[in-house]
Amino acid sequence: MEKDPIAVIDFGSQYTQLIVRRIRELGYYSKLYQPGELRETGKPAVVVLSGGPRSTLEDGAPDIDFDYLKGMGVPVLGVCYGMQLLNQKFGGSVAPGNKREFGRATLKNESSGNCIFSGMSETSQIWMSHSDTVENLPEGTKVLARNDDGVPVALKWAEGFYGIQFHPEVSHSTEGNQLLKNFVNMGSDLPDFEIASFKDHLVQRVRDEVNGRKVVCGVSGGVDSSVLAALLHEAEVDTRNIFVDTGLLRKNEAEEVVSLFESFGIPIETIDASEKFLTALKGKTDPEEKRRIIGRLFVEIFFDAVGDDVELLAQGTLYPDVIESATSGSIASTIKTHHNRVDKIMELKSEGRVLEPLDELFKDEVRALGRVLGLPAKVVNRHPFPGPGLAVRCPGEVTEEKLKIIRDADKIFIDLLHEHGQYDNVWQAYAALIPVKTVGVKGDERCYEFALSIRAVTSEDAMTAEWAQLPYEVLGDISNKILNEVDGVNRVLYDISTKPPASIEWE
């Protein structure tokens, strides 16, 4: 990667990674930086200032070195918070809005000539998520677009400096990709992004970071850890792959993982720690506590098995994992703590003992990397599976009885999606136990059993998700078979929640 990546400055929006993702979709390499890292961006072709959860009116609100930004001499686009910040920097003001504006809105394009709205419709749907709004505009500011209420939602302050109040990176902004394309193409000497060549960059990154040290890699059979193991194998580093059976896996999954890695020539060691995890989780109901317990215990068991001489721990951490956990250096709000972001691992990171070569990639990019590395389709096309396993699909206390219900129902669900040709049409699908019992009738007798939720979503990168509109006959078959074959369930519900506001997993 000879050219510096397009710089996206992270002011904490949960959509920030999507800006990076969209720019990569355009074929250009983009990377995220914190506001204080502006001088570390090198010579990017363009700079994007992201949205964020804070107000520019707050004391201590995130800021930017504006003089340095202007001195870079490259096009700059402020999105939401970024737009408000730029308006202040140019001498305008920001005021609290009369109401929080969240969701779909209509953009009315008032621009002409070559600018960020070139080739776009006069009106189009956009996605809003903000409380404050720009108030007084600096002299010479040009309004490029307004919403239905006549409020400016796109500005140009000076040559190369643009601001938009909406989020072009989310799919709900129907012409958002075109806007980003117009803006990025204002830059010169753009850095290309193509996964086949990026693989070589990652291989070299692994070799440089490993630098002769021994690597221990935790594998699960999921897409992320499988691609990570294959990447380490490609880099020819000294790696010990360990599979910890937490007892929180899907039906027959432990056996399938061992067979899978044997099939593409990567040796693994298996540790059965099922009893330890279930004992540690006994009586625990808080989702964050459960995640922390699983993460910490995994690390303890892992390091007990490999000893104290481990020099590097390799993890399949992805971009969305980092932003949702709001990890060190990030100013984003924490959505949930990921299993690879618990205290022990963060301590290891501070010591330079964690290797995360996939942390710049989104899930679909990891799948593409897996194909380039030669992994079979059944691995790279597999639905995501959470690190804490079925524990996050079992709200409340985790018990063996509940896990058996979830495993049996989940297998039926997934098998029928394959049978009906629907598996590859959804991003993720699973069964989750609802921690309440309801009255039903089985064999002409009253029964009092658990309700079960099945969930299938469509998504591009897990940052946002829509519920999958599966055919009624498919849902009927799934419900009927679960109710007839899974003991302990007398009611099946289909989850039609979007993300946001719901997350993909239950916990």
Image (cartoon, rainbow, N blue to C red):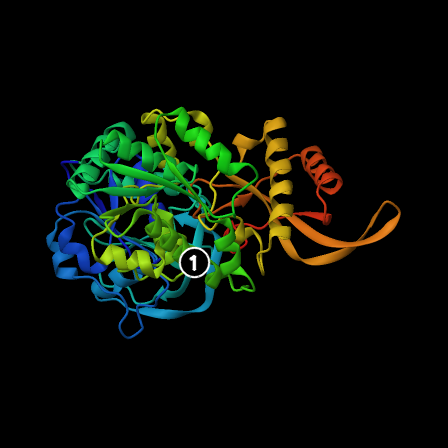
Q: Amino acid at mark 1?
A: Ser
**Viewer-closest of 473 and 435:** 435
- In this rendering, would 50 be left or right of 146? left
The answer to whether residue 257 is above or below residue 406 is above
Q: Residue furthest left?
A: 71
**Viewer-closest of 201 and 141:** 201
The answer to whether residue 301 is above or below residue 208 is below
- In this rendering, would 60 be left or right of 119? left
**Viewer-closest of 397 and 46:** 397
Mark 1 falls on what kind of element? strand
Q: Which image quarter is the N terminus in?
A: top left
Residue 143: name its quadrant: bottom left
The answer to whether residue 426 is above or below residue 334 is above
Residue 320 location (% of width, % of height): 38, 49
The answer to whether residue 15 is above or below residue 260 is below
Residue 480 location (% of width, % of height): 74, 38
- Residue drawn at x 21%, y 66% is 91
- In this rendering, would 224 be left or right of 68? right
Residue 22 location (% of width, % of height): 34, 41
* Count of picture labels: 1
- Residue drawn at x 72%, y 57% is 437
**Viewer-closest of 91 and 299:** 299
Residue 29 in view (yes/no):
yes
Residue of label 1: 129
Residue 51: name its quadrant: bottom left
Residue 500 in view (yes/no):
no
Q: Residues within 10 Å of mark 1 (few under 14, many from 20)?
A: some
